[in-house]
Amino acid sequence: MDALREARVFVPVVAQLSQAHLTAEGLVSDKEADMALVSIQSPDGRRALPVFTCVDYLTQWHAQARPVAASMRKTSLSAVEDNNQLIVVNPGQDPTFVVRRPAIWAIAKEQPWVPSYNHEAVSQDVRQLIRLMPQVEDVQLAAAAGADSRSAKGRILAGGGHGPELEITLVLKPGMTREQLDATITDFQQRLAASEVISELVDSVQIKLSQAS
């Protein structure tokens, strides 16, 4: 991620009709076109901005798009302004690298970025969330299986995956009933959703359950 922060990338833009007028014969005339960023939809339905590290990759992906060179910081600002929650680096290539929302904001603001599973503020906040949950004895944080990206040959790149980022394991007291279990999970999910720290620093969460010995 640090190398990407300083990189120059190529953003695809396409012509988008902004105004058109009908003649008396019903024909379209006086067209005006604006250049617009291309956005794609991620597998989980979120809006994503594709960017490329070279022009050839971009034209292979979209032959009609025009490549515009920009710094990663400027690209991140554009992604935020255009309501993109992800930046996908080199879609269609091996490997593809996904920059998640918290990292986009950090790059745009020129601030350091720490993955949520290594972030002390996230750890402290999650532990604070379970303090008033009597059925939870402990909590463990780790990188989720989808946090890293992997090439076709199996080479792992730290970060850049398209799956869940943060894995939270709740260590529960033994002997819980199904009703208690469901209530505990719902309570924790609601606490996560209400947390400003989680909202700002965590992209996506996978919750697992474990029983205390």
Image: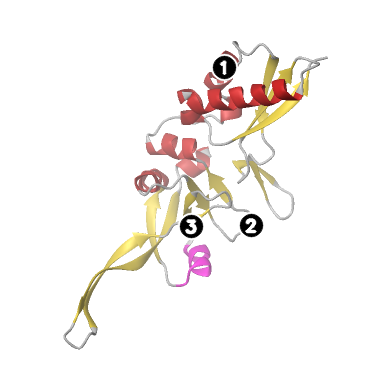
- What range is drawn magenta here? 55-63
- Report the amino acid beneath label 3: Ile
Q: Is residue 123 magenta?
A: no
Residue extending farthest to the left is 24
In this view of the protein, which residue sits in the foreground, 186 or 108? 186
Front: mark 3 or 1: 1
Q: Is residue 154 visible?
A: yes
Q: Position of residue 30 (x, y in %)?
A: 19, 77
Q: Position of residue 19 (x, y in %)?
A: 23, 69
Q: CA distance from mark 3 to mark 1?
A: 35 Å
Q: Residue 168 occupies which quadrant of the picture?
A: top right
For image coordinates 53% across by 36% down, the residue present is 203
What residue is disc 1 on? 129
For image coordinates 18% across by 83% down, the residue present is 23
Q: Position of residue 176 (x, y in %)?
A: 77, 18
Q: Is residue 52 visible?
A: no
What residue is disc 2 on? 94
- Report the amino acid beneath label 2: Asp
Q: Is residue 34 left or right of residue 212?
A: left
Which numbered disc covers residue 40? 3
Q: Is residue 19 above or below residue 46?
A: below
Local packing at callout 2 (Cα closer than 10 Å; few below 14, some 14-19, many 20+) is few
For image coordinates 63% across by 53% down, the residue present is 95
Q: Residue 210 occupies which quadrant of the picture?
A: top right
Q: CA distance from mark 2 to mark 3?
A: 18 Å
Q: Position of residue 13 (x, y in %)?
A: 38, 62
SS assignment at label 2: loop
- Report the amino acid beneath label 1: Leu
Looking at the image, is mark 2 or mark 1 earlier in the sequence?
2
In this view of the protein, which residue sits in the foreground, 147 or 196? 196
Question: In which quadrant will I find the C terminus?
Answer: top right
Front: mark 2 or 3: 3
